Image: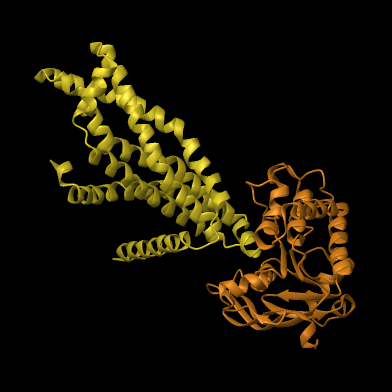
Chain colours: A yellow, B orange
């Protein structure tokens, strides 16, 4: 029971924190310099991780798919299976989870360190709204960067899949692409990619919450980093279930 | 009593607790404009909390905290931000922003809070850095600075907006005597050249003797002595007397 009430308290606090982010998004001054700094931090520095992971995952997935589809004589379907699974689910989800690990822990640790070393107090003492200055640009950077990173992941996965398939069947690139996109509709592509903006919002808000609100000094830095990753990842998976339901509702043909 | 117009900071019956521990117990005092007051006391007696209450980084449980004729307790953020512009804060470990260079640390409040053009911001930033002896170090990040340089940089940032009141949390802790004396010298210059009120938390009695017009001694959350160094050194309170004389 105590655990349950703590959970409710936590959900309420993170909810209010996230609401504050949304309200402050719309209020000037807009922190463009901070936003571009954070976009570089979240986007550019995560690109290699996302592309390499996507490529490797694409190659591995094709190997597994091939071994199954060979049994049914359906190897021609490999590019389509690869594209649909990557664009619809694997790309968005894995990109979200990777970012929760790399960026979530970073945001949690940096903000917690700033709290412990009184840098956040220093910002307040300079009459600067620390929430708007530190939290809002980080959340916004996650929201903007994640859909783009997901695209990179999707196409890196497709490239990995193609190279793996090419090594096995010598398939031509044009044929692979044509088969890959045969079954893919715009709704399969746009809605799942955009849903990662929600994942970005979750990563930004949760990790900022743990970092910004810590009061445990140096110990709080490690805790904030760990909690950011664990809770963001968990919430991304739960949100994914709900978002898929929403996408099926809004684009019924994608559920077929 | 100081005339109302010339009060820089006033505490009226301030109480502050953290859980069961009472950190400040019914503390009242007045600090005049242009005065230098050193807060002395053993560790954990509420000295840093006093500074944070003045800056409204914390709220007292009860009582009033007046800064230049404004009660900052319960003040809404927009007005508070205006009051904070009158204050400068040198944090214990300087609290410089890790991700910004020293120059950017100083230019940030100027670009955010003033309408000065870029050239003027550049000029002011360089002048203040030079004043604290860091004119050649603007491009360095805080991680590349020594303890004494960090303190001076923190002081420069606190002074860049030319505050009426400067709060300094242990400005000379962890520094050798020569560097500590240099920091005290900088603080004294603020007071004499700009008429800045100084409220300094310190364990350094030598520094307090050099800088302070008045000394306040906190013990177990209670203000046990407040007066000139001579007055406090003859105080009836044992802790206050020992802190000043030993």
Q: Residue at x 39, y 51 (%)?
A: A201
Q: Nearer the viewer, residue A205 or B119?
A: B119
Q: Is residue B45 visible?
A: no
- The N terminus of chain A - image quarter: bottom left
Residue A70 location, x and y as percent?
A: 14, 17
Q: Residue at x 37, y 62 (%)?
A: A15
> Residue at the left extreme?
A72
Asked which quadrant contains residue A54, the reply is top left
Q: Residue at x 74, y 44 (%)?
A: B145
Left or right for B92, reference A236: right
Asked which quadrant contains residue B44, the reply is bottom right
> Residue at the top extreme?
A170
Q: Nearer the viewer, residue A130 or A106?
A: A130
Q: Residue at x 45, y 57 (%)?
A: A209
Residue A50 location, x and y as percent?
A: 40, 33
Residue B43 location, x and y as percent?
A: 70, 65
Left or right for B40, reference A235: right
Residue B60 location, x and y as percent?
A: 59, 77
- The C terminus of chain A - image quarter: top left
Question: Relative to residue B80, is residue B146 depicted above or below?
Answer: above
Q: Is residue B43 visible?
A: yes
Left or right for A47, reference A80: right
Q: How many marks?
A: 0
């Amino acid at each position: 029971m105590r655990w349950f009430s703590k959970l409710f308290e936590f959900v309420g606090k993170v909810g209010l924190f996230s609401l504050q982010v949304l309200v402050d998004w719309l209020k000037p001054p807009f922190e463009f310099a901070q936003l571009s700094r954070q976009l570089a931090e979240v986007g550019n520095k995560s690109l290699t991780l996302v592309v390499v992971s996507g490529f490797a995952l694409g190659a591995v997935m094709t190997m597994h798919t091939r071994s199954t589809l060979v049994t049914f004589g359906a190897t021609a379907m490999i590019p389509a299976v690869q594209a649909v699974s990557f664009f619809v689910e694997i790309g968005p989800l894995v990109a979200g989870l990777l970012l929760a690990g790399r960026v979530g822990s970073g945001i949690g640790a940096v903000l917690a360190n700033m709290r412990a070393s009184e840098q956040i107090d220093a910002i307040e003492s300079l009459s600067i709204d620390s929430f708007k200055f530190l939290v809002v640009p980080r959340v916004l950077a996650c929201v903007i960067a994640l859909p783009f990173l997901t695209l990179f992941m999707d196409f890196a996965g497709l490239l990995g899949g193609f190279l793996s398939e090419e090594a096995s069947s010598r398939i031509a690139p044009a044929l692979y692409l044509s088969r890959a996109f045969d079954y893919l509709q715009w709704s399969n592509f746009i809605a799942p990619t955009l849903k990662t903006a929600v994942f970005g919002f979750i990563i930004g808000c949760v990790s900022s919450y743990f970092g910004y609100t810590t009061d445990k000094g140096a110990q709080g830095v490690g805790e904030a980093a760990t909690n950011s990753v664990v809770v963001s990842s968990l919430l991304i998976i739960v949100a994914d279930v709900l978002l898929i339901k929403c996408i099926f509702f809004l684009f019924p043909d994608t559920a077929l | 009593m100081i005339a109302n117009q010339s009060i820089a900071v006033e505490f009226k019956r301030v109480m502050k607790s953290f859980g069961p521990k009472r950190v400040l117990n019914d503390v009242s005092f007045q600090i005049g404009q242009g005065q230098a007051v050193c807060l002395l006391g053993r560790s954990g007696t509420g000295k840093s909390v006093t500074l944070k209450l003045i800056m409204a980084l914390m709220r007292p449980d009860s009582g009033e905290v007046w800064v230049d004729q404004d009660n900052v307790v319960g003040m809404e953020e927009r007005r508070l931000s205006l009051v904070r512009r009158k204050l400068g804060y040198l944090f214990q470990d300087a609290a410089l922003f890790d991700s910004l260079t020293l120059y950017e640390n100083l230019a940030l409040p100027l670009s955010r809070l003033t309408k000065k053009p870029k050239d003027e911001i550049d000029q002011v930033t360089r002048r203040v850095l030079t004043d604290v002896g860091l004119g050649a170090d603007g491009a360095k990040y805080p991680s590349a600075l020594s303890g004494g340089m960090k303190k001076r940089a923190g002081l420069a940032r606190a002074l860049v907006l030319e505050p009426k009141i400067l709060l300094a949390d242990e400005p000379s802790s962890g520094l050798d005597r020569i560097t500590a004396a240099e920091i005290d010298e900088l603080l004294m210059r603020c007071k004499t050249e700009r008429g800045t009120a100084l409220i300094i938390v310190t364990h350094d009695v030598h520094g307090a003797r050099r800088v302070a017009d008045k000394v306040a001694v906190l013990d177990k959350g209670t203000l046990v002595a407040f007066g000139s160094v001579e007055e406090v050194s003859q105080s009836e309170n044992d802790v206050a007397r020992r802190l000043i004389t030993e």
